[in-house]
Image (cartoon, grey):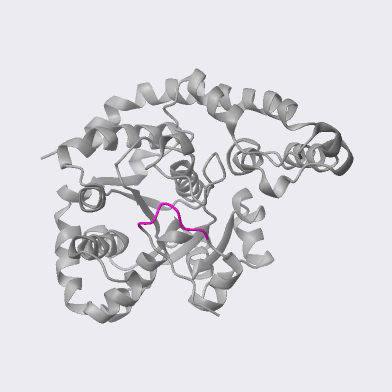
Amino acid sequence: MATEKIDPWSSTQAFDYLRLFEQFGLSHISDELSAKANFHLIRRQVIFAHRDFDLWLKDALEGKPVAVMSGIKPSSEFHLGSKLTADEMIFFQKKFGAHVFYSIADLEAFADNNLSLEESFSFAVSNLADFLALGLDPKKSFVYLQSQEKRVMNMAYIFSKRATPALLTALYGQRNYSLYFAALTQVGDILLPQHRDFGGPKRTLVPVGIDQDPHIRFARDIAFKEKLLAPSAIYHKLMRGLRGEAKMSKRDASSVLSLSDSQEEAKRKLASTLTGGRATAEEQRKLGGQIENCVFYEIMRYHFLLDEHELEKMRQDCVSGAVLCGDCKACYSKKVLEWLAKHQEKKKKMLPLAKKLLKKD
């Protein structure tokens, strides 16, 4: 059996999630752990695997200082995949009092997307305004541009002595050294909450898509060598593109639902989103919809139907053939469009704060 490859810079990679547990040592989330967290994304198995989440949650429940850390590459507008990570961070901040560390990875945008720091800054402000509008508490957060955070860069340089060419190739394959250094910088990001300026070693949870696991493994290896606490991680399944692509990617605007889309554009994208419909209406009424193929249902399940009974009704209406795809979309798209309009109004109010938080030296 061939080894599954994980490429954190790919926009097209698909995964056999079950094989990942055996090949990369991921842990299943037990019913007990799920009950303690009490998070709908875990109950629905959107978040499906972890590394040491049990240790992080134990410290959080005991009232010990804990952090949650992630980031975004400011190469485009916030989309539903970006929102998924933000929702997770906000949940752990609000429920467990975790201090949020959020890296705006403008250096990675330069290395991977060839965007200058000036070009990515406008995206950074917009991305952060989205995050604030979603509910991030800035008083319990440390938000920064990678290019401006000297502690991260110093840590990346120090950690580089622990990274051999063999290790980097094993994790990432043959790459340009700019991407290797981007990975080292991300290790600095992940371990920043344990810097003495932030109180020293503490459990840090990193919520990410499974495609980012090489960065987690790299950071855990460096943490062990530097005698720091290994960062914990939770992994969510990747949101598919609107047409059913393996991953909702910023590189293809037509495959994503952006939080900045106009009502007309969002309505058009939702109308064209892949469903699990049968070849004919008659066949669908008889056999039911193939909901496992439906990206529209995935969008509602991940983001917009938080009530379990309402989500189950949507599922039953589909698989029983009681409701056809066009009628389903017409009903539930209204919820998405209403949410989007309210979010964009909140975001407008957050733009000045986002600019202030990211003010360059």
Q: Quadrant of residue 43?
A: bottom right
Q: Which residues are magenta?
A: 9-14
The reply, left or right, for residue 43 in relation to residue 87 is: right
The one of 306 and 298 positioned closer to us in this rendering: 298
Q: Residue at x 37, y 53 (%)?
A: 70
Residue at 70% from the left image edge and 38% from the top image edge: 307
Residue 225 position within the rendered picture, expressed as x and y whole percent measured from the top left: 28, 81
Residue 317 lies left or right of residue 296; in this view the side is right
Q: Kindly identify the residue that appears in the image at 30 percent across and 41 percent down.
A: 75
Decide if residue 199 is in sight here: no
Nearer the observer, 297 or 102: 297
Left or right: where does residue 25 sit relative to residue 302? left
Q: Examine the rendered structure and indicate whether residue 343 appears above or below residue 18.
A: above
Q: Quadrant of the C terminus?
A: top left
Q: Is residue 306 magenta?
A: no
Residue 300 in view in this figure: yes
**Quadrant of residue 86 in the image?**
top left
Rendered-image quadrant of the N terminus: bottom right
Where is 124 relative to 42, above or below?
A: above
Q: Relative to residue 71, is residue 173 depicted above or below? A: below
Farthest residue toward the left? 361
Q: How many marks?
A: 0
**SS assignment for the magenta stretch, majority:** loop
* Residue 197 picture quarter: bottom left
> Which x, y percent locates residue 4?
49, 71
Q: Above or below — where is 301 with respect to 45?
A: above
**Residue placed most toward the observer, 96 or 221:** 221
